[in-house]
Image (tube, rainbow, N blue to C red):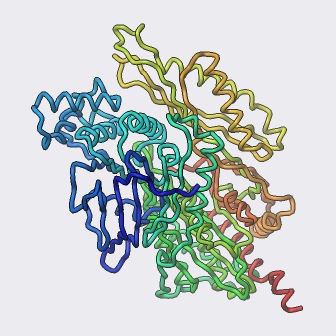
Amino acid sequence: MMSTNPVTPRVEIRSLSKRFGSVSALEEIDLTLGENEFVSLVGVSGCGKSTLLSIIAGLTEPTTGEVIVSGEPVTGPGRDRGVVFQHATLLPWLTARKNVEFALRGEPLTATQRSEVAREHLELVGLLGFEDHYPAQLSGGMQQRVALARSLSYRPEILLMDEPFGALDALTRHEMQELLTEVWETHRLTVLFVTHDIEEAVYISDRVMTMTPRPGRIHTQVEVDLPRPRRLEMQSHPRFIELSSHLLKSIRGVPSTKATATKVTSGTPLPSSVHPTEPRTAADFVDSQALGTFLTDLVRANSENPPGREGEAAQLIAERLARCGLDVELHEVEPGRPNVVAVLHGESEECLLFNGHVDTVAIGDLGLWTTDPLGGEIIDGKVYGRGTCDMKGGLAAMVAAIEAIVKAEVPRHRSLMLTAVIDEEVWFKGTQALINAGTLKNCTQAIVGEPTSLQVASALQGAAEFTAVVRGRSSHTGMAERGDNAIVKMTTIVAALQEYHESLRGLGATLGFPHDPSVNLGVIEGGVGVTFVPDTCRIAFDRQVFPGEDIEEVISEVRRIFAKVCADNDIDADLVCEQSFSPWQAGEDSTLAEGLERAHHEVTGTTAESALFRGYCEVELLARQGITGAVYGPGDLTQAHSPDEYVPLSEVETAAKVYAIVGESFLRTRSLSEYTKRK
């Protein structure tokens, strides 16, 4: 699958390097783009993709090396290169047509000719009828269509695209990918496309290149030998999956560089305000008052995702644990988005992992809140605010447990690690980055502090998330018979999905659970106005998957149902599985689950119920790495993501004590390798 250089070069990059002060962004880049070739550049954030594209565009000068376009060196911007950015950057006071005409001012055209060229290119991107709309009247996808039309209008030889669909929702992004491939297949030109999305890159490209981070270098080049023209259903083809998997392994195989880790110094040690007269366990050292204060501080540090602003909360956790004497680092996954990695070292490197996520979902409509979503107010023993339940309550309890273990001076035959990660609410980039870097290689057991109402969850339901697009034909509603209403066609698919949902009743009991898997329609979009027959309709839905079911079989089942309803009703539609999360269940002999149950009984005098965790969390991702896990944390999952989200402070304190007991037990027990060495 390795690429060879194209025969006819359009762009040649020779020994290119770029430094920003003392930081090397790009180093020794050698690259050739062939005439009419579509190439995508993929890599983690900060690897230099956009910097490389900016140098080719002539917007940034290289430190060393050169870029040759059609045999001439690049010395600045030129009309032989069109650029499309992540955001449309349209002039808000100009209509769609006038925005395109603005790009044609340097061409030898009359005003009438400019208007005709603008109209032609707006038609090319599917915006006929919207020429006189202003940007504020257009959706994000439509604005990007205008930006594409603008860049194509002056007929550049090369089109440079910097994550142009990154800010769009999944449904619109797929629509734009399909449009771009159709435009390129009709009007061939050389394209360099920067993206984070591997499947997007494989779908649209002739060749995909991956980059290593800091400094950026070309790591892998892969030819995409899928036939053209391409349609979205091709993404289920085995060859497509094989190419995507190969590229993902390539990116994950790039070793993490230590330069991304920032050491957090200890500062002033934490005072000990708890002095039990006859301490029995580390749980006796949990400081309830300090725990409540710290949780309030965490809630006040806004960490909504998107957009992904975990930095302040991560810093609070890092500084707190550094003051306890732990070895603490901030590992920046994306700019301003660090993971916290804190280790309490023992004689053996074998670690018990406390894992929690720093990010929260968006606050949402403030009018639905009766408390300050970033206030961390304590009312009737409950802490209110976004993320209190999911899962800053669990994180605060884990930090308090480690503080208590340190204060109790527990003998440490083994080690503890706490990871407070970014992006659990969206793509799990934080934990995946730790896995890729080998940070968790010494972890053998993991407690994930998601809200379980202090039940021990040793099973997890998974999910497959889908988007579907139905295509019809637009017309004026005065002549509606000339159209083909995509929304009406979509209702047939929705009815079939609801019938599928009903068919799952009783499956949960068969699998040994008190609830049933479900199909939920989460998004429906279609049409642009009451006077138009809608030509497209889009939905997003998911199928929850229980332990005992096979995720791939479930995805195939959904595809079969979708294909049948479309064939039976002559519906032109596409279905894409956006992402899937496998269900998980711990083995019956899970010592970690048993340890949590014993510790819960010791703290509360009651028996902890065993539960199925009914949301996705990273315990399954960790299990794939051979790390035995369990989910246990304060708060009711029904509170997560809701207005007036709260967590009972008493549950946070209980969780902290349970974590402390389990952590102490792990530290006091010698590892098998230690026993072997002593014998």
Is residue 509 at least partly visible in the picture? yes
Q: Is residue 227 above or below residue 471?
A: below
- Check the picture and name the quadrant holding the C terminus: bottom right
Q: Residue lying furthest left in this view?
A: 110
Residue 222 pos. (x, y %):
54, 55
Residue 30 pos. (x, y %):
41, 66
At 43% across and 66% down in the image, what residue appears? 47
At 13% across and 43% down in the image, what residue appears? 106
Viewer-nearest residue: 7 or 535: 7
At 32% across and 71% down in the image, what residue appears? 65
Would residue 114 be found to the left or right of residue 55 on screen?
left
Q: Is residue 42 above or below residue 233?
A: below
Q: Residue lying furthest front in this view?
A: 7
Residue 613 pos. (x, y %):
70, 51
At 71% across and 47% down in the image, what residue appears? 461
Residue 244 pos. (x, y %):
58, 51
Would residue 162 be found to the left or right of residue 256 on screen?
left
